Image: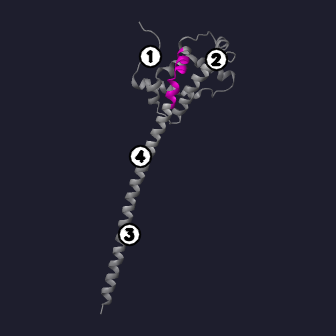
Amino acid sequence: MVDLALLQSVSYLAGALGVCVAAFYYVLNLRISQRNSKLALKAQEQTLETRQAQLLMSILQNYSSKEFQTDMEEMAYVWKWSDYDDFMSKYGMENVKETGKHATVFQIYEGTGVFVKRGLVNPELVYDLMRESVIVIWEKFSPIIESWRTRFSAPQIYLGFEFLYHEMKKVRDERGHPASSFGRVTP
């Protein structure tokens, strides 16, 4: 017959073996869970990079269009005015064609600035694509934009564009690039 002590020993061993199997199973599941978490994080990072690339390509598509480039160059180097009233008489609401030009250019920069501010697009990448145009346009038109903010009691007008301007200057300075003579002939 089977001894009671032997049965107790077998029972204890079975219990201990069950605890060991459960511990092994737990550790195995923990490792699998960690690996899956890392894979999920990597997938999220890749998705974010893909979305950033899609946003950047959308921005680039608008920025590199012939119409945008023509309007931006005209605004930067052809448009001249003596003061706010002179600007408004030449390029303001009464001149729909010219208003459409600056509204479109400013809005491209505004949207890009919002994307950069929200961390959806890397400012380094935007600088690589747009460089000095943001800086040149902001510096030329900021007195007009500041006047709009004051006259219309709307301090939020083109804040994204202004943010983008400061980011582009920061990137330029960090890279040690000199202030450009963008579009100007140098001797």
Task: Classify residue 31 by image quadrant.
Answer: bottom left
Q: Residues within 10 Å of mark 3 (few under 14, many from 20)?
A: few
Residue 61 belongs to magenta span? yes
Q: Is residue 10 above or below residue 157?
A: below
> How far apart are the alpha carbons under marks 2 and 1?
29 Å
User: Residue, x 64% and y 17% (percent of image)?
Assistant: 97
User: Residue, x 60% and y 17% (percent of image)?
Assistant: 143
Q: Is residue 60 visible?
A: yes
Q: Give the numbered dot on residue 30.
A: none
Magenta residues, as a range? 58-73
Instruction: Pick whichever of labels 1 and 4 is earlier in the sequence.
Output: 4
Residue 155 belongs to magenta span? no
Q: Residues within 10 Å of mark 4 (few under 14, many from 20)?
A: few
The amino acid marked with disc number 3 is Ala
User: Residue, x 45% and y 25% (percent of image)?
Assistant: 129
Which secondary structure type mostly characterizes the magenta part of the structure?
Answer: helix
Q: Nearer the viewer, mark 1 or mark 4?
A: 4
Task: Classify residue 154 by image quadrant.
Answer: top right
* Front residue (pair 84, 97): 97
Q: Give the numbered dot on residue 22.
A: 3
> How far apart are the alpha carbons under marks 1 and 3?
67 Å
* Front residue (pair 17, 70): 70
Q: Which residue is mark 4?
A: 42
Q: Which residue is mark 1?
A: 180
Q: Nearer the viewer, mark 2 or mark 4?
A: 2
Quadrant of the snapshot with the N terminus: bottom left
Instruction: Pick whichever of labels 2 and 1 is earlier in the sequence.
Output: 2
